[in-house]
Image (cartoon, rainbow, N blue to C red):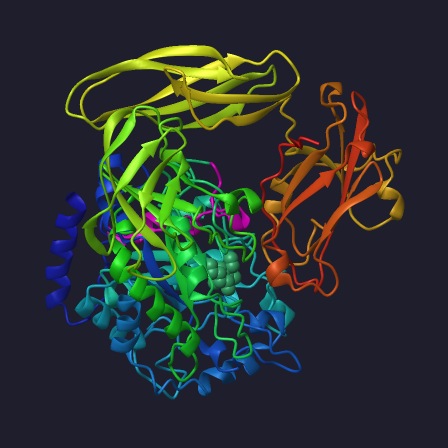
């Protein structure tokens, strides 16, 4: 308070003093937003959680070379770094950047008609070029290009006019700013310019990055989201992230900031399970989590082809069918879908992207209610595709049979979205009396068709009569009114070292009267645990069931009520997790795979952490051999096992007791498909020493030496029937 009084006094003194002395600017007291109350965060995030679908735009002067440099045309927005283009030469692209065909209203209309509710555009990518009017930098669209128009002003206005939330992407890493250089990011030919440890970086942060963020908020705000990136550089820390988070929230208190403001992202999976990590939502990249992340806010950002920035030669576009599938899969798991476009240097969104967005828009016009403002159901879905390849991030496999279902819910309305064309009848297994004991339905219809549908709930599924003519393509949403009370779903949470299993059963009462009943845990078909549960009208509860498994081997567990026990799940005892301590050695030697090889003085590393921290695009310490010894219980005698290795970039060769069990990638790998491929290798029983030590040896190597990425999951070992 005193400080403000002094400032006002000083103002009057100087206002009249001819010397026009430098007025001491009184910085407003900055508020701490790192410990925000849940209600306040919920209110701030509400629009974002309802939106579910946004447009990501990677646009910059890298669209001028459009992926081509020298004899390679596979570059994208990283062309300056990957083609090692010296700064003076790269700056020339700005002089050629003249997007005369740019039409802000058209871009926003394309996003809006696709069903997107917000737009996140690159204000500055890693190349350091500012695509907005910055007084802090001359390396921007106004001062360095012949175009000289403030495209961000036009876009923010068009978004406002059309009711789309305008948001910015901003890169912390900056290859162009002399104070942001570092050993591994050295773009200047003059070696002195390439080292800016500590103090020079903080100068970049305080005197360049923060002032630019202020310009973005003040010149184009209010903004929806500030989407940071490039946080993996060693100069950046979680502490700086917390400070920057507060700085941006103080500029605009209701802005949303992603977790890449700090170090909360773990590689491409996007989310460290550290609730303290700064940032409002997780950011899986080119990846869709295998299941719902509960009430964690997350958003998958995904390219339409293989590049974020415009790369003329890259025609590897995903189909509209696949894009609709990704949207439904993501929303059924409680996430947002940020789908990318890479406009040309003329200012056009590529025709292939526009065509697919239009197709998605037609689908959203019919099915939007099953997407917007929905929450995940207790289980995200069912169907063969799920079994076939686990998480869907890894490849272009698509769930597309009529048995592949995704669920979303809005209050006591459940949407069952069918990912393949149902003919005559559709059976939803997870809504059968067995699988959802006590739960019933009062009405079933199809989104896009007004008339009510005939249905019956059998023990093994809810069977719906499907109309002959379907209201749309790609995926089909059934609207189901929930009634009754009972078990909506259950989840195997964990198994402790000593074999105690912990299961959560989700019980809900959709009716207007009180409800009481028993929830049972069945182990190998026998009732092992029972719990009495009472629920008031329209309420729900999580019921935790615990049981100690005695025998080693495969156990069937199921949760149910009065002898109605639904889908069972196999639990393997003991639980052998491959995550954890492994021995690591760089380099390559054929002896490294041999079971008897003495690896005692190899480095002990933690997996997958060592790999996940490897996601910084530099050639790297993570390539080499990994070995782990493990005892396979004699209780599994004669059984083959499956080993899950997650996603390796670009290539791996894996051995069990010295025998090759699988490999992914290879030379030259098509790294855009390989690094998203989940490795699951089978080990036939004949290779296994039951009750004794076995050795897994993995060689992880890279193709172009231009770095790579990796993320879990790793294990647990699965026991196969045969
Ligand atoms: O390096 C960037 C990449 O160019 C692109 O911007 C993506 C989008 O999420 N993020 C970084 C890679 O994680």
Place residue 410 in its image quadrant: top left
For residue 705, above or below residue 431: below
Place residue 429 in its image quadrant: top left
For residue 431, above or below residue 166: above
Q: Position of residue 637 (x, y in %)?
A: 76, 23
Q: Position of residue 422 (x, y in %)?
A: 39, 52
Place residue 714 in its image quadrant: top right
Camera-side residue: 195 or 317?
317
Residue 266 part of the magenta segment: yes
Q: Residue at x 71, y 40 (%)?
A: 682
Q: Residue at x 28, y 62 (%)?
A: 115
Q: Can residue 671 be seen here?
A: yes
Q: Is residue 231 left or right of residue 629?
A: left
Quadrant (top left, top right, bottom left, bottom right) of the N terminus: top left
Q: Residue at x 41, y 72 (%)?
A: 353
Q: Can residue 173 be seen here?
A: no
Q: Residue at x 62, y 40 (%)?
A: 608
Q: Position of residue 182 (x, y in %)?
A: 59, 60
Q: Position of residue 566 (x, y in %)?
A: 43, 26
Camera-side residue: 285 or 140?
285
Q: Is residue 566 left or right of residue 664?
A: left
**In this picture, which residue range is highlighted in magenta?**
244-273
Camera-side residue: 637 or 249?
637
Residue 278 part of the magenta segment: no
Camera-side residue: 721 or 126?
721
For residue 136, above or below residue 408: below
């Amino acid at each position: 308070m005193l400080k403000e009084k002094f400032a006002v006094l000083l103002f009057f003194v100087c206002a009249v003093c001819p010397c026009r002395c430098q007025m001491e600017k009184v910085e407003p007291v900055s508020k701490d937003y790192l410990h925000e109350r849940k209600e306040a965060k919920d209110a701030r995030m509400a629009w974002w959680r309802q939106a579910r679908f946004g447009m990501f735009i990677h646009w910059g002067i890298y669209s001028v070379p459009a992926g081509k440099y020298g004899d390679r045309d596979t570059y994208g927005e990283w062309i300056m770094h990957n083609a090692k283009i010296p700064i003076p030469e790269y700056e020339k692209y700005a002089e050629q950047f003249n997007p005369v065909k740019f039409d802000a209203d058209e871009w926003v209309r394309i996003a809006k008609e696709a069903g997107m509710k917000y737009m996140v555009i690159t204000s500055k990518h890693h190349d350091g070029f500012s695509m907005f009017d910055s007084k802090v930098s001359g390396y921007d669209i106004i001062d360095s290009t012949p175009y000289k128009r403030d495209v961000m002003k036009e876009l923010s206005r068009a978004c406002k006019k059309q009711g789309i939330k305008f948001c910015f992407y901003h890169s912390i890493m900056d290859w162009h700013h002399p104070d942001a250089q570092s050993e591994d990011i050295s773009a200047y030919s003059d070696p002195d310019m390439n080292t800016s440890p500590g103090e020079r970086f903080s100068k970049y942060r305080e005197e360049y990055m923060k002032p630019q963020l202020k310009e973005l908020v003040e010149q184009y705000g209010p903004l929806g989201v500030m989407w940071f990136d490039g946080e993996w550089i060693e100069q950046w820390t979680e502490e700086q992230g917390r400070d920057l988070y507060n700085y941006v929230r103080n500029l605009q208190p209701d802005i949303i900031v992603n977790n890449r403001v700090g170090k909360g992202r773990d590689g491409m999976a996007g989310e460290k399970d550290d609730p303290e990590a700064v940032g409002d939502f997780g950011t899986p990249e080119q990846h869709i989590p295998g299941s719902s992340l509960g009430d964690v806010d997350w958003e998958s950002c995904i390219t339409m082809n293989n590049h974020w920035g415009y790369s003329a030669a890259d025609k590897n576009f995903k189909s509209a069918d696949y894009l609709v599938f990704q949207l439904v899969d993501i929303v059924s798991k409680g996430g947002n879908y940020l789908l990318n476009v890479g406009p040309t240097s003329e200012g056009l969104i590529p025709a292939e992207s526009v065509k697919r967005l239009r197709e998605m828009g037609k689908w959203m016009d019919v099915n939007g209610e099953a997407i917007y403002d929905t929450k995940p159901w207790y289980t995200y879905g069912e169907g063969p595709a799920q079994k076939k390849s686990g998480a869907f991030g890894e490849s272009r496999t698509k769930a597309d049979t009529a048995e592949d279902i995704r669920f979303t819910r809005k209050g006591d309305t459940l949407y069952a979205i069918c990912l393949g064309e149902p003919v005559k009848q559709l059976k939803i297994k997870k809504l059968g009396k067995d699988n959802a004991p006590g739960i019933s339905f009062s009405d079933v219809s199809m989104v896009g068709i007004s008339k009510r549908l005939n249905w019956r709930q059998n023990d093994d599924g809810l069977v719906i009569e499907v109309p002959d003519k379907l209201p749309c393509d790609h995926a089909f949403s059934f609207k189901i009114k929930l009634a009754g009370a009972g078990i909506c779903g259950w989840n195997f949470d964990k198994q402790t070292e000593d074999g105690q299993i912990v299961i959560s059963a989700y019980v809900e009462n959709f009716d207007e009267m009180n409800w009481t009943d028993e929830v049972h845990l069945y182990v190998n078909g026998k009732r092992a645990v029972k719990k009495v549960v009472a629920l008031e009208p329209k309420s729900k509860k999580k019921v935790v069931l615990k049981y100690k498994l005695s025998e080693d081997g495969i156990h069937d567990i199921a949760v149910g009520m009065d002898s109605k026990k639904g889908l069972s799940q196999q639990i393997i005892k003991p639980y052998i997790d491959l995550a954890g301590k492994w021995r690591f050695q760089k380099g390559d030697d054929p002896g490294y795979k041999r079971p008897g090889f003495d690896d005692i003085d190899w480095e002990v590393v933690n997996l997958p952490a060592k790999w996940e921290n490897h996601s910084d695009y530099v050639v790297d310490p993570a390539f080499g051999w990994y070995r782990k010894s493990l005892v396979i219980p004699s209780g599994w005698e004669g059984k083959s096992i499956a080993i899950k290795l997650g996603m390796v970039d670009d290539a791996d060769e894996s051995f069990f007791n010295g025998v090759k069990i699988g490999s992914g990638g290879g030379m030259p790998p098509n790294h855009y498909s390989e690094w998203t491929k989940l490795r699951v290798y089978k080990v036939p029983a004949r290779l296994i020493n039951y009750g004794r030590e076995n050795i897994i040896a993995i060689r992880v190597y890279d193709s172009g030496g231009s770095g790579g990425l990796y993320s879990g999951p790793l294990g647990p070992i699965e026991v196969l029937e045969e």
